[in-house]
Image (cartoon, rainbow, N blue to C red):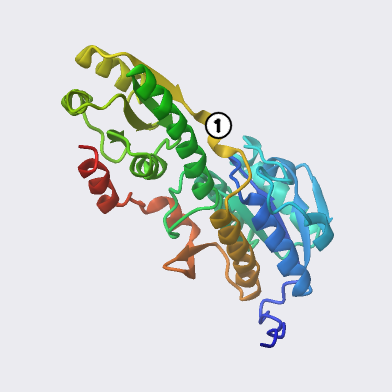
Amino acid sequence: MTTPEFTRHPNPAGIKRIAVLTSGGDAPGMNAAIRAVVRTGAQQGIEVVGVRRGFSGLHRGELQVLGPRDVANIIQRGGTILLTARSRTWRSPEGRAKGAEVLREWGIDGLIVIGGDGSFHGAYYLQEEHGIPVIGIPGTIDNDLYGTDHTIGYFTAVETALEAVDKLRDTGASHERIFVIEVMGRHAGHIALDVAVAGGAEEVFIPEDPKPVESVVKIVKESVTKGKMGSIIIVAEGHPGGAQAVADALAEGTGLETRVSILGHIQRGGSPVSSDRVLASRLGEAAVFALMEGEKGVMVGRTGGGITYTPLHETWEKRKDVSRDLYRCALSLSV
């Protein structure tokens, strides 16, 4: 078996120097994406500049050239070596104009933004107002961006939440308690749904399908009657009232001891699982190739195993629903 010979990717856009930044909430796998961007650039003869602290650092000129050795031993690390921040200044035309000026001073031919919908809004307006080509890489644990099957960080967030659920189930059964566990997902129930199915939860509450808690009281009572020692209820933070409202209603309706556990930002941390590392590596490479091909104003995603381009504005304008088949499965297996 012979090793495939490395070949240069077509570069009709004449890209020579690009910048990369991480913005918004951090997600496990962002470092793997940064690494992929830097090393793909190096192999293609393109210089890569890292921007520290997202858009906030961009308009302050916090830039540095990154080489392959600068991104060594980061693929397994959570967080982002470039740091991240949310910038109020960037929301103004003046803030974006300052950022564009910095990019021009550095001779940047294109910008890669790793983040979620808020970050993509900032990237979109930068391109619209100043003509700087931008490519988005979906980095958000919520998995709520249209145009990709999964976002970087999602797989790790699910595994982290599931580990906590398994441990809480042990103590819940020991004390014959109901545990209501809140996971992240302000506008999307992807994490909640996967964790509910994998964790064997009795019920799941997601923003896409708000429902009265009273409808679950009967299910929990029947579970106890059938001999279940404890119950697990998963609630996405975006469901009206969150976990506390669900717990209060269940305690009143069943008379059983109920406890609330809000997992919070623990879901953002930790070493990324293999699926996030692979996804981030593929999308980082694809983002560089997209700029070289002359693409701009798009997000690189993975759909059905292949790389796809989606206009940035569609990633937030079009709705990405949860899997209704999986939701049905979660409910049918809760008996």
Quarter of the figure with the C terminus: top left
Please give the residue where the numbered disc 1 appears in the rendered image.
265
Q: Nearer the viewer, residue 61 or 166?
A: 166
Q: Nearer the viewer, residue 253 or 47?
A: 253
| Residue 67 shows in this picture | no
Determine the residue located farthest toward the bottom in the rendered image.
2
- Residue 65 in the image: x percent, y percent? 83, 57
Instruction: Tell me: residue 315, above or below residue 28.
Output: below
**Number of marks in the rendered image:** 1
Q: Quadrant of residue 56?
A: top right
- Residue 320 in the image: x percent, y percent? 36, 52
Q: Quadrant of residue 291?
A: bottom right
Instruction: Tell me: residue 283, above or below residue 117.
Output: below
Please name the amino acid that badge 1 sits on. Answer: His
The residue positioned 83% from the left and 59% from the top of the image is 69
Q: Is residue 119 left or right of residue 292?
A: left
- Residue 214 in the image: x percent, y percent? 18, 23
The residue positioned 74% from the left and 75% from the top of the image is 44
The local crowd at label 1, few if under 14, some if 14 to 19, many if 20 or more residues have their Cα within 10 Å, is: few
Q: Is residue 131 left or right of residue 17?
A: left
Q: In what element is the residue under mark 1?
A: helix
Instruction: Tell me: residue 36, above or below residue 57.
Output: below
The residue positioned 83% from the left and 52% from the top of the image is 64
- Residue 302 in the image: x percent, y percent? 48, 64
Q: Is residue 190 left or right of residue 112?
A: left
Quarter of the figure with the N terminus: bottom right
Q: Quadrant of residue 261?
A: top left
The residue positioned 67% from the left and 59% from the top of the image is 111
| Residue 175 shows in this picture | yes
Q: Nearer the viewer, residue 247 or 318?
A: 247
